[in-house]
Image (spheres, rainbow, N blue to C red):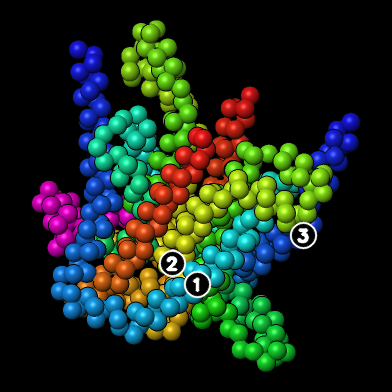
Amino acid sequence: MKKAGRRKGKVVIPGFGITMGITVSMLSILILIPLASVMAYSFKMSPFEFVKLITKPGVVNAFATSIGCAFVAAVINAVFGVMIAWVLVRYDFFGKRFIDGIIELPFALPTAVAGITLTKMYSDNGFLGKALERIGIKAAYTKIGIIIAMVFIGIPFVVRAIQPVLEKLPKSCEEAGLMLGASRAVIFRKIIFPEIMPPLLTGFGLALARGIGEYGSVIYISGNSEKNKTQVVSYIIMQKLNSGNVDYEGAAAIALILLIISFIMLFAINIVQHVASKRTSA
Amino acid sequence: MKRSREKIVKWLLIGITVIFLLFMLVLPMVEVIYRALKDGLETYKTALTAKNTLSALRVTLIATVIALTVNTILGIIMAWQVTKFDFKGKNILSTLIDIPFSISPVIAGLAFIMTFGRSGWAKPVIDGINNALGTDIVLVFSVPAVVLATIFVTFPFISREIIPILHAQGRTEEEAAALMGASGMTIFRKVTFPHIKWGLVYGMILCTARAFGEFGAVYAVSKARGKTFTLPLEVDALYMSGTADSITQAFAVSSLLVGMAVIVLILKNIVEYRGKSKKSV
Protein backbone atom coordinates (compact mmCIF):
# COMPACT_ATOMS: atom_id res chain seq x y z
CA MET A 1 0.00 0.00 0.00
CA LYS A 2 2.64 2.41 1.11
CA LYS A 3 4.96 1.31 -1.65
CA ALA A 4 2.39 1.96 -4.33
CA GLY A 5 1.78 5.44 -2.99
CA ARG A 6 5.43 6.26 -3.07
CA ARG A 7 5.96 5.05 -6.58
CA LYS A 8 3.11 7.19 -7.78
CA GLY A 9 4.72 10.36 -6.41
CA LYS A 10 8.11 9.42 -7.71
CA VAL A 11 7.84 9.19 -11.45
CA VAL A 12 5.62 12.12 -12.32
CA ILE A 13 7.94 15.14 -12.11
CA PRO A 14 10.80 14.86 -14.58
CA GLY A 15 14.44 15.62 -13.97
CA PHE A 16 15.30 13.44 -10.99
CA GLY A 17 18.37 11.86 -12.55
CA ILE A 18 19.96 14.97 -13.96
CA THR A 19 19.38 17.18 -10.91
CA MET A 20 20.62 14.42 -8.62
CA GLY A 21 23.74 14.01 -10.72
CA ILE A 22 24.52 17.72 -10.83
CA THR A 23 23.78 18.27 -7.14
CA VAL A 24 25.92 15.41 -5.90
CA SER A 25 28.83 15.99 -8.26
CA MET A 26 29.06 19.75 -7.76
CA LEU A 27 28.61 19.44 -3.99
CA SER A 28 31.44 16.92 -3.99
CA ILE A 29 33.81 18.90 -6.19
CA LEU A 30 33.23 22.30 -4.62
CA ILE A 31 32.65 21.47 -0.97
CA LEU A 32 33.14 17.90 0.16
CA ILE A 33 36.38 16.91 -1.58
CA PRO A 34 38.26 20.05 -0.48
CA LEU A 35 37.05 19.51 3.10
CA ALA A 36 38.06 15.86 2.92
CA SER A 37 41.53 17.02 1.88
CA VAL A 38 41.80 18.94 5.14
CA MET A 39 40.93 15.82 7.09
CA ALA A 40 43.30 13.66 5.04
CA TYR A 41 46.08 16.17 5.61
CA SER A 42 45.62 16.22 9.36
CA PHE A 43 45.69 12.42 9.45
CA LYS A 44 49.22 12.54 8.06
CA MET A 45 50.35 13.30 11.59
CA SER A 46 50.66 10.53 14.10
CA PRO A 47 48.01 10.62 16.83
CA PHE A 48 50.72 11.54 19.32
CA GLU A 49 51.87 14.55 17.26
CA PHE A 50 48.27 15.55 16.71
CA VAL A 51 47.46 15.61 20.42
CA LYS A 52 50.73 17.37 21.22
CA LEU A 53 49.98 20.08 18.66
CA ILE A 54 46.41 20.80 19.66
CA THR A 55 47.21 20.83 23.38
CA LYS A 56 49.89 23.50 22.99
CA PRO A 57 49.02 26.39 25.34
CA GLY A 58 48.70 28.86 22.44
CA VAL A 59 46.25 26.62 20.61
CA VAL A 60 44.20 25.79 23.71
CA ASN A 61 44.05 29.48 24.62
CA ALA A 62 42.90 30.35 21.10
CA PHE A 63 40.07 27.84 21.32
CA ALA A 64 39.11 29.15 24.76
CA THR A 65 39.13 32.73 23.45
CA SER A 66 37.15 31.96 20.30
CA ILE A 67 34.53 29.83 22.00
CA GLY A 68 34.30 31.97 25.15
CA CYS A 69 33.99 35.29 23.35
CA ALA A 70 31.58 33.85 20.76
CA PHE A 71 29.43 32.51 23.59
CA VAL A 72 29.29 35.84 25.44
CA ALA A 73 28.57 37.65 22.17
CA ALA A 74 25.80 35.19 21.30
CA VAL A 75 24.21 35.68 24.74
CA ILE A 76 24.31 39.47 24.28
CA ASN A 77 22.81 39.04 20.82
CA ALA A 78 20.10 36.75 22.19
CA VAL A 79 19.01 39.36 24.74
CA PHE A 80 19.13 42.32 22.36
CA GLY A 81 17.82 40.21 19.49
CA VAL A 82 14.63 39.32 21.35
CA MET A 83 14.19 42.95 22.31
CA ILE A 84 14.81 44.30 18.81
CA ALA A 85 12.46 41.74 17.26
CA TRP A 86 9.79 42.59 19.83
CA VAL A 87 10.11 46.32 19.24
CA LEU A 88 10.01 45.88 15.46
CA VAL A 89 6.94 43.60 15.51
CA ARG A 90 4.83 45.13 18.27
CA TYR A 91 5.48 48.86 18.28
CA ASP A 92 5.06 51.63 15.76
CA PHE A 93 7.38 54.59 15.86
CA PHE A 94 9.19 57.00 13.63
CA GLY A 95 12.17 55.41 11.88
CA LYS A 96 11.01 51.83 12.35
CA ARG A 97 11.34 50.97 8.67
CA PHE A 98 14.87 52.33 8.65
CA ILE A 99 15.87 50.22 11.64
CA ASP A 100 14.25 47.16 10.11
CA GLY A 101 16.15 47.82 6.91
CA ILE A 102 19.63 48.07 8.41
CA ILE A 103 19.50 44.94 10.58
CA GLU A 104 21.28 42.95 7.85
CA LEU A 105 24.09 45.47 7.50
CA PRO A 106 26.58 43.07 9.15
CA PHE A 107 25.83 40.56 6.35
CA ALA A 108 26.24 43.16 3.63
CA LEU A 109 29.30 44.97 4.98
CA PRO A 110 32.61 43.21 4.25
CA THR A 111 34.05 41.87 7.49
CA ALA A 112 37.44 43.52 6.93
CA VAL A 113 35.75 46.92 6.71
CA ALA A 114 33.80 46.23 9.88
CA GLY A 115 37.00 45.10 11.56
CA ILE A 116 39.14 48.15 10.84
CA THR A 117 36.26 50.52 11.56
CA LEU A 118 35.41 49.03 14.95
CA THR A 119 39.11 49.02 15.83
CA LYS A 120 39.45 52.72 15.07
CA MET A 121 36.27 53.54 16.97
CA TYR A 122 37.25 51.65 20.11
CA SER A 123 41.01 52.25 20.16
CA ASP A 124 42.29 54.88 22.57
CA ASN A 125 42.19 57.67 19.99
CA GLY A 126 38.74 56.74 18.70
CA PHE A 127 35.78 58.56 20.20
CA LEU A 128 34.15 55.52 21.83
CA GLY A 129 37.50 54.20 22.99
CA LYS A 130 38.26 57.52 24.70
CA ALA A 131 34.89 57.52 26.45
CA LEU A 132 35.35 53.96 27.66
CA GLU A 133 38.90 54.66 28.79
CA ARG A 134 37.60 57.41 31.05
CA ILE A 135 35.55 54.87 32.98
CA GLY A 136 38.48 52.50 33.07
CA ILE A 137 37.55 50.07 30.30
CA LYS A 138 40.00 49.20 27.56
CA ALA A 139 38.08 47.76 24.61
CA ALA A 140 40.42 47.56 21.62
CA TYR A 141 43.11 44.85 21.69
CA THR A 142 41.38 43.00 24.53
CA LYS A 143 38.73 40.29 24.73
CA ILE A 144 36.10 43.00 25.10
CA GLY A 145 37.03 44.14 21.59
CA ILE A 146 36.69 40.62 20.25
CA ILE A 147 33.24 40.37 21.84
CA ILE A 148 32.19 43.73 20.34
CA ALA A 149 33.19 42.53 16.86
CA MET A 150 31.34 39.23 17.33
CA VAL A 151 28.22 41.03 18.58
CA PHE A 152 28.34 43.18 15.44
CA ILE A 153 28.45 40.25 13.01
CA GLY A 154 25.87 38.26 14.99
CA ILE A 155 23.06 40.85 15.30
CA PRO A 156 20.94 39.70 12.33
CA PHE A 157 20.85 36.01 13.26
CA VAL A 158 18.65 36.19 16.36
CA VAL A 159 16.47 39.09 15.18
CA ARG A 160 15.67 37.48 11.85
CA ALA A 161 15.01 34.10 13.45
CA ILE A 162 12.50 35.42 15.97
CA GLN A 163 10.74 38.14 13.96
CA PRO A 164 8.57 35.87 11.75
CA VAL A 165 7.49 33.77 14.74
CA LEU A 166 6.47 36.83 16.73
CA GLU A 167 4.57 38.15 13.72
CA LYS A 168 2.54 34.96 13.51
CA LEU A 169 1.85 34.70 17.23
CA PRO A 170 -1.81 35.70 17.62
CA LYS A 171 -2.44 38.57 19.98
CA SER A 172 -5.46 36.69 21.30
CA CYS A 173 -3.18 34.39 23.33
CA GLU A 174 -1.79 37.33 25.22
CA GLU A 175 -5.21 38.91 25.58
CA ALA A 176 -6.57 35.69 27.03
CA GLY A 177 -3.76 35.72 29.55
CA LEU A 178 -4.44 39.34 30.36
CA MET A 179 -8.17 38.65 30.87
CA LEU A 180 -7.30 35.84 33.24
CA GLY A 181 -5.39 38.35 35.31
CA ALA A 182 -1.81 37.46 34.45
CA SER A 183 0.78 40.20 34.73
CA ARG A 184 2.84 41.29 31.70
CA ALA A 185 5.88 39.49 33.06
CA VAL A 186 3.97 36.25 33.51
CA ILE A 187 2.48 36.53 30.02
CA PHE A 188 5.92 36.95 28.52
CA ARG A 189 7.37 34.07 30.49
CA LYS A 190 4.51 31.62 30.07
CA ILE A 191 3.00 32.48 26.69
CA ILE A 192 5.48 34.29 24.49
CA PHE A 193 8.77 32.84 25.62
CA PRO A 194 7.91 29.16 24.93
CA GLU A 195 6.90 30.15 21.39
CA ILE A 196 10.10 32.00 20.56
CA MET A 197 12.38 29.49 22.28
CA PRO A 198 13.13 27.28 19.21
CA PRO A 199 13.96 30.19 16.85
CA LEU A 200 15.93 31.83 19.66
CA LEU A 201 18.04 28.68 20.02
CA THR A 202 18.52 28.51 16.25
CA GLY A 203 19.59 32.14 16.05
CA PHE A 204 21.82 31.72 19.06
CA GLY A 205 23.44 28.65 17.51
CA LEU A 206 24.05 30.37 14.18
CA ALA A 207 25.53 33.44 15.86
CA LEU A 208 27.73 31.22 18.02
CA ALA A 209 28.96 29.19 15.05
CA ARG A 210 29.70 32.34 13.09
CA GLY A 211 31.55 33.84 16.04
CA ILE A 212 33.74 30.79 16.64
CA GLY A 213 34.97 30.73 13.05
CA GLU A 214 35.07 34.49 12.51
CA TYR A 215 38.19 36.00 11.02
CA GLY A 216 37.93 39.34 9.21
CA SER A 217 36.03 41.43 11.72
CA VAL A 218 37.95 40.11 14.72
CA ILE A 219 41.64 40.12 13.82
CA TYR A 220 42.13 43.88 13.85
CA ILE A 221 40.41 44.68 17.11
CA SER A 222 41.82 41.65 18.92
CA GLY A 223 45.45 42.73 18.66
CA ASN A 224 46.42 39.05 18.27
CA SER A 225 48.65 38.93 21.32
CA GLU A 226 49.58 35.49 22.57
CA LYS A 227 50.41 36.89 26.00
CA ASN A 228 47.01 38.57 26.46
CA LYS A 229 45.26 35.51 25.03
CA THR A 230 43.59 37.54 22.30
CA GLN A 231 44.44 35.21 19.41
CA VAL A 232 41.43 33.50 17.88
CA VAL A 233 41.51 30.06 16.24
CA SER A 234 41.12 31.38 12.68
CA TYR A 235 44.12 33.63 13.27
CA ILE A 236 46.27 30.69 14.42
CA ILE A 237 45.32 28.72 11.30
CA MET A 238 46.03 31.66 9.01
CA GLN A 239 49.39 32.24 10.67
CA LYS A 240 50.41 28.70 9.79
CA LEU A 241 49.62 29.38 6.11
CA ASN A 242 51.70 32.52 5.83
CA SER A 243 55.02 32.37 4.10
CA GLY A 244 58.01 32.10 6.37
CA ASN A 245 56.66 29.53 8.75
CA VAL A 246 54.32 27.43 6.63
CA ASP A 247 52.92 24.53 8.64
CA TYR A 248 50.14 22.90 6.62
CA GLU A 249 49.80 19.87 8.85
CA GLY A 250 49.41 22.01 11.96
CA ALA A 251 46.86 24.19 10.19
CA ALA A 252 44.92 21.12 9.07
CA ALA A 253 44.91 19.63 12.57
CA ILE A 254 43.49 22.77 14.16
CA ALA A 255 41.05 23.16 11.29
CA LEU A 256 39.86 19.61 11.87
CA ILE A 257 38.92 20.38 15.49
CA LEU A 258 37.15 23.54 14.32
CA LEU A 259 35.31 21.53 11.66
CA ILE A 260 34.15 18.99 14.24
CA ILE A 261 32.82 21.80 16.45
CA SER A 262 30.98 23.28 13.44
CA PHE A 263 29.43 19.93 12.52
CA ILE A 264 28.21 19.39 16.07
CA MET A 265 26.62 22.84 16.07
CA LEU A 266 25.05 22.34 12.64
CA PHE A 267 23.64 19.04 13.84
CA ALA A 268 22.26 20.59 17.04
CA ILE A 269 20.59 23.41 15.09
CA ASN A 270 19.00 20.89 12.74
CA ILE A 271 17.63 18.92 15.70
CA VAL A 272 16.13 22.06 17.24
CA GLN A 273 14.47 22.94 13.94
CA HIS A 274 13.23 19.40 13.47
CA VAL A 275 11.70 19.25 16.96
CA ALA A 276 10.14 22.69 16.51
CA SER A 277 8.56 21.86 13.15
CA LYS A 278 7.16 18.64 14.58
CA ARG A 279 5.63 20.49 17.48
CA THR A 280 3.93 23.09 15.34
CA SER A 281 2.62 20.61 12.81
CA ALA A 282 1.18 18.35 15.54
CA MET B 1 -1.95 53.48 36.04
CA LYS B 2 -1.28 50.25 34.17
CA ARG B 3 -1.58 52.08 30.87
CA SER B 4 1.11 54.60 31.71
CA ARG B 5 3.45 51.89 32.93
CA GLU B 6 3.00 50.05 29.66
CA LYS B 7 3.86 53.20 27.81
CA ILE B 8 7.03 53.67 29.80
CA VAL B 9 8.08 50.10 29.04
CA LYS B 10 7.31 50.63 25.37
CA TRP B 11 9.42 53.75 25.02
CA LEU B 12 12.17 52.31 27.17
CA LEU B 13 12.45 49.27 24.88
CA ILE B 14 12.35 51.43 21.76
CA GLY B 15 14.98 53.70 23.26
CA ILE B 16 17.38 50.88 24.10
CA THR B 17 16.89 49.32 20.67
CA VAL B 18 17.57 52.57 18.86
CA ILE B 19 20.66 53.36 20.95
CA PHE B 20 22.05 49.84 20.59
CA LEU B 21 21.63 49.83 16.81
CA LEU B 22 22.88 53.38 16.52
CA PHE B 23 26.13 52.46 18.23
CA MET B 24 26.56 49.06 16.63
CA LEU B 25 25.42 49.73 13.05
CA VAL B 26 25.00 53.39 12.16
CA LEU B 27 28.06 54.92 13.82
CA PRO B 28 30.53 52.50 12.18
CA MET B 29 29.26 53.55 8.75
CA VAL B 30 29.58 57.22 9.66
CA GLU B 31 33.09 56.50 10.94
CA VAL B 32 34.14 54.96 7.60
CA ILE B 33 32.93 57.94 5.61
CA TYR B 34 34.46 60.41 8.09
CA ARG B 35 37.87 58.73 8.01
CA ALA B 36 37.79 58.31 4.24
CA LEU B 37 37.20 62.03 3.66
CA LYS B 38 39.37 63.28 6.52
CA ASP B 39 42.23 64.40 4.28
CA GLY B 40 40.04 65.96 1.63
CA LEU B 41 38.52 64.89 -1.66
CA GLU B 42 41.82 64.93 -3.55
CA THR B 43 43.33 62.20 -1.37
CA TYR B 44 40.09 60.28 -1.60
CA LYS B 45 40.19 60.34 -5.39
CA THR B 46 43.83 59.30 -5.52
CA ALA B 47 43.15 56.34 -3.24
CA LEU B 48 40.25 55.14 -5.38
CA THR B 49 42.09 55.45 -8.68
CA ALA B 50 45.32 53.83 -7.47
CA LYS B 51 46.50 50.95 -9.66
CA ASN B 52 46.13 48.39 -6.88
CA THR B 53 42.59 49.53 -6.09
CA LEU B 54 41.47 49.25 -9.69
CA SER B 55 43.02 45.81 -10.03
CA ALA B 56 41.30 44.74 -6.80
CA LEU B 57 37.99 46.08 -8.07
CA ARG B 58 38.40 44.04 -11.26
CA VAL B 59 39.16 40.80 -9.39
CA THR B 60 36.26 41.44 -6.99
CA LEU B 61 33.83 41.92 -9.88
CA ILE B 62 35.09 38.81 -11.71
CA ALA B 63 34.77 36.66 -8.58
CA THR B 64 31.35 38.05 -7.68
CA VAL B 65 29.86 37.61 -11.15
CA ILE B 66 31.14 34.06 -11.58
CA ALA B 67 30.16 32.99 -8.04
CA LEU B 68 26.71 34.49 -8.49
CA THR B 69 26.16 32.76 -11.84
CA VAL B 70 27.39 29.36 -10.68
CA ASN B 71 25.52 29.48 -7.39
CA THR B 72 22.27 30.67 -8.96
CA ILE B 73 22.19 27.76 -11.39
CA LEU B 74 23.30 25.24 -8.77
CA GLY B 75 21.02 26.73 -6.13
CA ILE B 76 17.93 26.28 -8.30
CA ILE B 77 18.92 22.73 -9.24
CA MET B 78 19.66 21.76 -5.65
CA ALA B 79 16.45 23.28 -4.33
CA TRP B 80 14.43 21.48 -7.03
CA GLN B 81 16.19 18.23 -6.18
CA VAL B 82 15.60 18.50 -2.44
CA THR B 83 11.96 19.60 -2.58
CA LYS B 84 10.41 17.86 -5.57
CA PHE B 85 11.68 14.34 -5.03
CA ASP B 86 11.82 11.76 -2.26
CA PHE B 87 14.98 9.77 -1.88
CA LYS B 88 17.15 8.21 0.77
CA GLY B 89 19.62 10.55 2.41
CA LYS B 90 17.67 13.67 1.52
CA ASN B 91 18.12 15.18 4.98
CA ILE B 92 21.83 14.51 4.90
CA LEU B 93 22.10 16.10 1.47
CA SER B 94 20.35 19.27 2.55
CA THR B 95 22.54 19.48 5.65
CA LEU B 96 25.67 19.05 3.50
CA ILE B 97 24.57 21.91 1.25
CA ASP B 98 24.46 24.17 4.32
CA ILE B 99 28.01 23.32 5.46
CA PRO B 100 29.72 26.48 4.17
CA PHE B 101 27.39 28.49 6.39
CA SER B 102 28.71 27.21 9.64
CA ILE B 103 32.39 26.64 9.01
CA SER B 104 35.13 29.20 9.30
CA PRO B 105 35.95 30.86 5.95
CA VAL B 106 39.62 30.33 6.77
CA ILE B 107 39.00 26.59 6.54
CA ALA B 108 37.51 27.08 3.07
CA GLY B 109 40.74 28.69 1.89
CA LEU B 110 42.81 26.04 3.60
CA ALA B 111 40.76 23.31 1.94
CA PHE B 112 41.61 24.56 -1.56
CA ILE B 113 45.30 24.91 -0.72
CA MET B 114 45.33 21.33 0.51
CA THR B 115 43.56 20.05 -2.57
CA PHE B 116 45.21 21.99 -5.39
CA GLY B 117 48.35 23.39 -3.71
CA ARG B 118 51.93 22.35 -4.28
CA SER B 119 51.60 19.32 -2.02
CA GLY B 120 47.84 18.82 -2.57
CA TRP B 121 46.72 15.48 -3.92
CA ALA B 122 44.86 16.99 -6.89
CA LYS B 123 47.92 18.86 -8.15
CA PRO B 124 48.98 16.01 -10.51
CA VAL B 125 45.44 15.90 -11.88
CA ILE B 126 45.51 19.60 -12.71
CA ASP B 127 49.03 19.25 -14.16
CA GLY B 128 47.80 16.39 -16.32
CA ILE B 129 44.92 18.49 -17.63
CA ASN B 130 47.27 21.38 -18.32
CA ASN B 131 49.68 19.12 -20.20
CA ALA B 132 46.95 17.54 -22.26
CA LEU B 133 45.24 20.80 -23.19
CA GLY B 134 48.32 22.99 -23.27
CA THR B 135 46.69 25.33 -20.76
CA ASP B 136 48.17 26.90 -17.68
CA ILE B 137 45.50 26.69 -15.01
CA VAL B 138 46.67 27.36 -11.47
CA LEU B 139 44.12 26.75 -8.76
CA VAL B 140 45.94 28.26 -5.79
CA PHE B 141 47.21 31.79 -5.23
CA SER B 142 45.56 32.92 -8.45
CA VAL B 143 42.36 34.56 -9.66
CA PRO B 144 40.69 31.16 -10.28
CA ALA B 145 41.52 30.28 -6.69
CA VAL B 146 39.81 33.46 -5.50
CA VAL B 147 36.77 32.53 -7.60
CA LEU B 148 36.66 28.99 -6.17
CA ALA B 149 36.92 30.24 -2.59
CA THR B 150 34.16 32.76 -3.25
CA ILE B 151 31.90 30.07 -4.73
CA PHE B 152 32.55 27.93 -1.66
CA VAL B 153 31.50 30.51 0.93
CA THR B 154 28.39 31.58 -1.00
CA PHE B 155 27.35 28.07 -2.01
CA PRO B 156 24.15 27.69 0.09
CA PHE B 157 22.81 31.25 -0.13
CA ILE B 158 20.39 30.76 -3.01
CA SER B 159 19.14 27.23 -2.39
CA ARG B 160 18.49 28.21 1.22
CA GLU B 161 16.14 31.00 0.19
CA ILE B 162 14.25 28.90 -2.36
CA ILE B 163 13.89 25.61 -0.46
CA PRO B 164 11.34 26.90 2.12
CA ILE B 165 9.22 28.47 -0.66
CA LEU B 166 9.19 25.27 -2.69
CA HIS B 167 8.39 23.25 0.44
CA ALA B 168 5.41 25.44 1.23
CA GLN B 169 4.19 25.32 -2.36
CA GLY B 170 4.13 21.52 -2.56
CA ARG B 171 4.30 19.39 -5.67
CA THR B 172 0.76 19.14 -6.99
CA GLU B 173 1.11 21.91 -9.58
CA GLU B 174 4.26 20.40 -11.08
CA GLU B 175 2.68 16.94 -11.04
CA ALA B 176 -0.38 18.22 -12.86
CA ALA B 177 1.79 19.95 -15.45
CA ALA B 178 3.87 16.81 -15.94
CA LEU B 179 0.77 14.66 -16.37
CA MET B 180 -0.42 17.03 -19.06
CA GLY B 181 2.81 16.38 -20.85
CA ALA B 182 4.92 19.44 -20.11
CA SER B 183 8.68 18.98 -20.27
CA GLY B 184 10.92 19.63 -17.28
CA MET B 185 12.10 23.02 -18.53
CA THR B 186 8.56 24.13 -19.33
CA ILE B 187 7.33 23.10 -15.90
CA PHE B 188 10.13 25.03 -14.28
CA ARG B 189 9.62 28.14 -16.40
CA LYS B 190 5.84 28.30 -16.27
CA VAL B 191 4.95 26.71 -12.93
CA THR B 192 7.83 26.81 -10.47
CA PHE B 193 9.66 29.98 -11.43
CA PRO B 194 6.80 32.43 -10.75
CA HIS B 195 6.64 31.10 -7.18
CA ILE B 196 10.32 31.40 -6.41
CA LYS B 197 11.03 34.60 -8.32
CA TRP B 198 11.36 36.92 -5.34
CA GLY B 199 13.06 34.37 -3.14
CA LEU B 200 15.57 33.81 -5.92
CA VAL B 201 16.31 37.52 -6.30
CA TYR B 202 16.61 37.83 -2.53
CA GLY B 203 19.09 34.96 -2.40
CA MET B 204 21.06 36.44 -5.29
CA ILE B 205 21.35 39.76 -3.45
CA LEU B 206 22.65 38.08 -0.29
CA CYS B 207 25.03 35.99 -2.39
CA THR B 208 26.40 39.10 -4.09
CA ALA B 209 26.96 40.85 -0.76
CA ARG B 210 28.87 37.93 0.69
CA ALA B 211 30.85 37.41 -2.53
CA PHE B 212 32.27 40.91 -2.80
CA GLY B 213 32.88 41.12 0.94
CA GLU B 214 34.55 37.78 1.57
CA PHE B 215 37.84 38.08 3.37
CA GLY B 216 39.08 35.04 5.29
CA ALA B 217 38.69 32.43 2.56
CA VAL B 218 40.11 34.68 -0.14
CA TYR B 219 42.95 35.86 2.08
CA ALA B 220 44.22 32.29 2.40
CA VAL B 221 44.46 31.70 -1.36
CA SER B 222 45.49 35.12 -2.65
CA LYS B 223 48.94 36.51 -2.02
CA ALA B 224 49.77 38.86 -4.90
CA ARG B 225 48.76 42.45 -4.31
CA GLY B 226 47.77 44.23 -7.51
CA LYS B 227 47.16 40.89 -9.23
CA THR B 228 44.91 38.56 -7.26
CA PHE B 229 43.80 40.85 -4.43
CA THR B 230 40.12 41.68 -3.99
CA LEU B 231 38.87 44.95 -2.51
CA PRO B 232 38.69 43.65 1.08
CA LEU B 233 42.25 42.35 0.76
CA GLU B 234 43.38 45.72 -0.58
CA VAL B 235 41.73 47.37 2.44
CA ASP B 236 43.68 45.01 4.69
CA ALA B 237 46.98 45.68 2.91
CA LEU B 238 46.54 49.45 3.12
CA TYR B 239 45.47 49.33 6.76
CA MET B 240 48.34 47.05 7.72
CA SER B 241 50.93 49.39 6.12
CA GLY B 242 50.26 51.44 9.20
CA THR B 243 51.09 54.96 8.01
CA ALA B 244 48.45 57.64 8.54
CA ASP B 245 48.11 58.12 4.77
CA SER B 246 47.63 54.45 4.00
CA ILE B 247 45.06 54.09 6.76
CA THR B 248 43.07 56.96 5.26
CA GLN B 249 43.37 55.22 1.90
CA ALA B 250 42.14 51.98 3.50
CA PHE B 251 39.03 53.81 4.65
CA ALA B 252 38.60 55.41 1.23
CA VAL B 253 38.52 51.96 -0.38
CA SER B 254 36.26 50.83 2.48
CA SER B 255 33.81 53.59 1.67
CA LEU B 256 33.42 52.04 -1.77
CA LEU B 257 32.48 48.75 -0.11
CA VAL B 258 30.12 50.55 2.29
CA GLY B 259 28.42 52.06 -0.76
CA MET B 260 28.02 48.60 -2.28
CA ALA B 261 26.65 47.29 1.04
CA VAL B 262 24.11 50.11 1.22
CA ILE B 263 22.96 49.39 -2.34
CA VAL B 264 22.56 45.73 -1.39
CA LEU B 265 20.48 46.67 1.65
CA ILE B 266 18.23 48.97 -0.37
CA LEU B 267 17.68 46.32 -3.07
CA LYS B 268 17.00 43.72 -0.41
CA ASN B 269 14.34 45.91 1.20
CA ILE B 270 12.68 46.61 -2.14
CA VAL B 271 12.56 42.92 -2.97
CA GLU B 272 11.28 42.03 0.48
CA TYR B 273 8.57 44.65 0.21
CA ARG B 274 7.48 43.52 -3.25
CA GLY B 275 7.57 39.86 -2.25
CA LYS B 276 5.38 40.60 0.76
CA SER B 277 2.82 42.75 -1.01
CA LYS B 278 2.53 40.09 -3.73
CA LYS B 279 1.78 37.46 -1.13
CA SER B 280 -0.99 39.42 0.52
CA VAL B 281 -2.85 39.95 -2.75
Say few, some or many: other residues with alpha carbon within 10 Å of mark 1 (under 14 / 14 to 19 / 20 or more).
many
In the rendered image, which quarter is residue B119 located in? bottom right
Q: List x then y, in percent, for residue A120.
A: 22, 63
Marked residue chain, label 1 = B
Most extreme residue toward the left, as rendered? A134
Q: Amino acid at mark 3?
A: Ile
Q: Amino acid at mark 1?
A: Ala
Q: Secondary structure at mark 2?
A: helix
Q: Which mark is residue B212?
A: 2
- The residue that appears at 27% across and 50% down in the rendered structure is B24
Marked residue chain, label 2 = B
Q: Is residue A67 visible?
A: no
Q: CA distance from mark 1 to mark 3?
A: 27 Å
The quarter of the rendered structure image containing the N terminus of chain B is top left
Query: Nearest the camera: B280 or A268?
Result: B280
Disc on the earlier residue, 2 or 1: 1
Query: Nearest the camera: A57 or B228?
Result: B228
Task: Look at the numbered discs 2 and 1 and tell me whether their residues touch, using CB distance below 8 Å.
Answer: yes
Main SS, magenta residues? helix
Q: List x then y, in percent, for residue B95.
A: 63, 50
According to the picture, the residue beneath numbered tag 1 turns out to be B63
Q: Is residue A191 above or below residue A93?
A: above
Q: Amino acid at mark 2?
A: Phe
Q: Is residue A168 visible?
A: yes
Q: Which residues are magenta?
A: A121-150
According to the picture, the residue beneath numbered tag 3 turns out to be A18
Marked residue chain, label 3 = A
